[in-house]
Image (spheres, grey):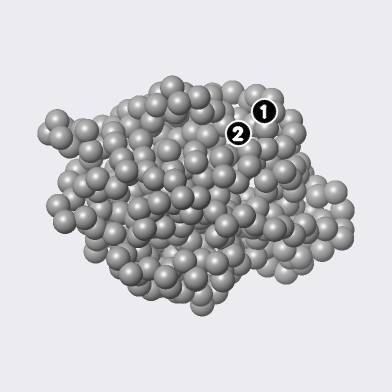
Amino acid sequence: MSGNSRRNVRKAPGAPVLRPSFVLPSCWPVTPSRIRAELESLRRCRVRSIGRSSGGREIMGVVHAPSHPVLTIGITAGMHGHEPGGVAAALNLIHLLEYGKDLSGRRWDAVLRRIKFVVVPVLNVDARARCLDSFVGLTVEQLQLDASGYTAGGTLLGRRRRAPAGHRAHLGGLYNDAGFDILNATDGRSLAGTDSVELRSAVLFFQAEGVDVAVDLHAHGSPPMFYAPLGLVPKAVGRAGFNVAEKVRRAARKAGLPFAAPEQVAARKKCDVPVNVFSSALHHNVYGALPLLFEGPQGIIGCFKAFYGGRERIVRDPGLPHAQIIFIYLFVIQEIARTLRDLRDKKETPCR
Ligand SMILES: [Zn+2]
């Protein structure tokens, strides 16, 4: 959800827009063929199609359950096509669940103990197919081009409930093939009248697998952080989400990782887009599951304006490499698992 800094650029630099290509490291399986190869290799994890996107592509779901799980964590990634880091992280998690190691050969034993995982590695498969596969080393302007999409004249389409039809040279990563922004495809509560078959597929999958905690993985150009689910969920749920996010942040800071405080965007007065609508909808439609929304780093470089920590700041993004980005996502998943398992062991219920 890299909307933080989108306000900085109103116009693309001009047509034609050059699109870079990459040699991607093996720990970053975000192309359709790499994703398919990873999923087809699974034997211990259950894999199934959970629906079709508005563009007709299969949306896949993966389940891994130990013999006596104390908790079920649901993970969605790839809602936004221009945020490949979440997808790469989800595929690393799936590899870890299957083989005991991530794609770099690193073990994360604390992730695996007594937790059932239910993963949708690429929610918006239409947008993943059309967006760049990495933003490591690119600038915020290049990120915004892919996020928003642009016309043949190079004007950004901007963030809307539905992208304007016609004159699109590139439909941005925010949208499915029907042009709808999945994030805002509901009022945050009901699924009635939703424009997103992707959201409905994820909800039904999470319902069927009994998800307790729903973690939605995004990426942005600011320090890693959570958006606390306030405003559209009961206060106790908002507090529980904030507390988990704060525990993860403290663990990350202790480990020397960059991390910002949880953002309470829905409580902000001047909020142009209510950013946690999707995860709130998961709470209301998956039996009261605790929703968490995490933003990992994009790996872009340079200075730009971004809104976080309650105010606008100048961010200098260091351009983290792919392996470091994956490490941060998996560290966060590990700490979420550890925190929730500890709460369950103390008979405290972080969620329903
Ligand atoms: Zn996003």
**Residue 90 shown left or right of residue 298 in the figure:** left
Whether ligand 1 has any atom under 8 Å from the Cβ at mark 1 is answered as no
Q: Relative to residue 235, is residue 19 depicted above or below?
A: below
**Residue 25 shown left or right of residue 265 in the figure:** right
Most extreme residue toward the front is 105
Q: Quadrant of residue 120?
A: bottom left
Q: Relative to residue 144, is residue 51 depicted above or below?
A: below
* SS state under label 1: strand
User: Depth check: 26 or 15 in front?
Assistant: 26
Where is residue 166? Give x, y as percent: 73, 69
Tell me which label, 1 or 2, sits earlier in the chain. Answer: 2
The residue where tag 2 is placed is 222
User: Depth check: 160 or 251 in front?
Assistant: 251
Where is residue 265? Give x, y as percent: 48, 33
**Residue 203 shown left or right of residue 142 in the figure:** left
Q: Residue at x 74, y 30 (%)?
A: 303
Three-letter residue code for mark 2 = Ser
Instruction: Give the number of the disc on residue 315.
Output: 1
State the CA–CA distance, disc 1 to disc 2: 7 Å
Where is residue 16? Give x, y as percent: 87, 60
Q: Residue at x 72, y 43 (%)?
A: 137
Image quadrant containing the C terminus: top left
CB within 8 Å, label 1 to label 2: yes
* SS state under label 2: loop
Q: Quadrant of residue 342?
A: top left
Q: Residue at x 85, y 49 (%)?
A: 13
* Residue 238 in sight in this render: no
Image quadrant containing the N terminus: top right
* Residue 56 in sight in this render: yes
Where is residue 116? Give x, y as percent: 25, 53
Three-letter residue code for mark 1 = Val
